Amino acid sequence: MIYINSQKANIEFFPDGTVRIKNMTNVSQNKVTWQYENDAELFQIYSLVRHIQKKCKNENIELYIPYLPNARMDRVKSDDEVFTLKYFAEIINSLGLKNVSILDAHSNVSLGVIDNVKNIVPQKYIFDCLQKVKSQMNSDNLVIYFPDEGASKRYADLLQGYQTCFGIKKRDWATGEIKGLSVFGLDSADALRGKAVLMIDDICSYGGTFFYSSKALKELGAEEIYSYTTHTEQSIFDSDRGVYLKALETGMVKKHYTTNSIFNRESDYIEVIDCIMSRDNDYIMF
């Protein structure tokens, strides 16, 4: 989905499936927001920006991409793999944009290959989540849990004053399957007993890491568990691989919070925090 200055772009399609974009006359249009749904939107973004630049005489276009597509393909391991992030970035860079803002970039590589890029720290959305969790938890104490050391490094500075801990996964390196998880950083074996825990990370696909994390936290005595990811993919609902949904359905985890950077479904177990129309209130890290 694409917005121009907070207004949804008028995008239609001809019977053959090719795109038709209409009513592009406002010369003040300079902020484009791309709420990613599919790769075909990249051509729509390219066409929209070129139109604004050439027809509206506007060379100061800002592009906001809450969820950056192709960020997972940030390296290749063999010659037969295609470095899609690099070529995606080349298309974006060819537009000569004033800046490109990404919300909670999954990979630092993406910040290195895109010109004039800014990474938006999700401080606002994490704080919104904290307030929601505090309003419904039964325990008086909230502990922050990071599924790995990477998440701890990413978010710990935003959450000073909270007791924190982190997980280390036990993985079958032959298959990539998570076999279990251990929790570190606790003062004692009873540090979580009777407390509420908020798990925080940047992205959730099938939720295996959160599933095993919640099991380990329950075993350590956590009374109630919540979770937040900036980006939650629709794959969390996958009936075969979406193991985390089972934790939500059974109540092992009470609620999952996420932004609408890519998530676009309704669920009793997932609450969405808007990051599209609230863009002006974000905190930006250059």
Image: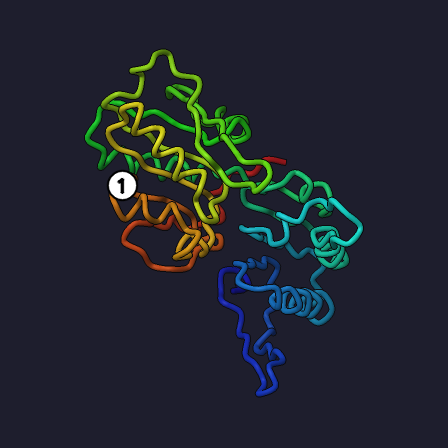
Q: Position of residue 31 (x, y in %)?
A: 59, 57
Q: Is residue 95 above or below residue 150?
A: below
Q: Amino acid at mark 1?
A: Lys
The quarter holding residue 187 reads: top left
Q: Seen in the image, is 134 located left or right of residue 93?
A: left
Question: Mark 1: few, some, or many residues within 10 Å (few <14, many ≥20)?
Answer: some
Q: Which of 109/222 is in front? A: 222
The quarter holding residue 39 reads: bottom right
If the image is split into quadrants, where does the C terminus sit?
A: top right
Q: Position of residue 111 (x, y in %)?
A: 67, 42
Q: Which residue is mark 1?
A: 254
Which residue is at 23% across, 33% downward?
A: 137
Looking at this view, name the residue that lies furthest to the left. 138
Q: Which of 25/151 is in front? A: 151
Q: Which of 5/136 is in front? A: 136
Looking at this view, name the residue that lies furthest to the right. 79
Q: Which of 191/64 is in front? A: 191
The quarter holding residue 184 reads: top left
Q: Is residue 99 above or below residue 109?
A: below
Q: Seen in the image, is 186 located left or right of residue 91?
A: left
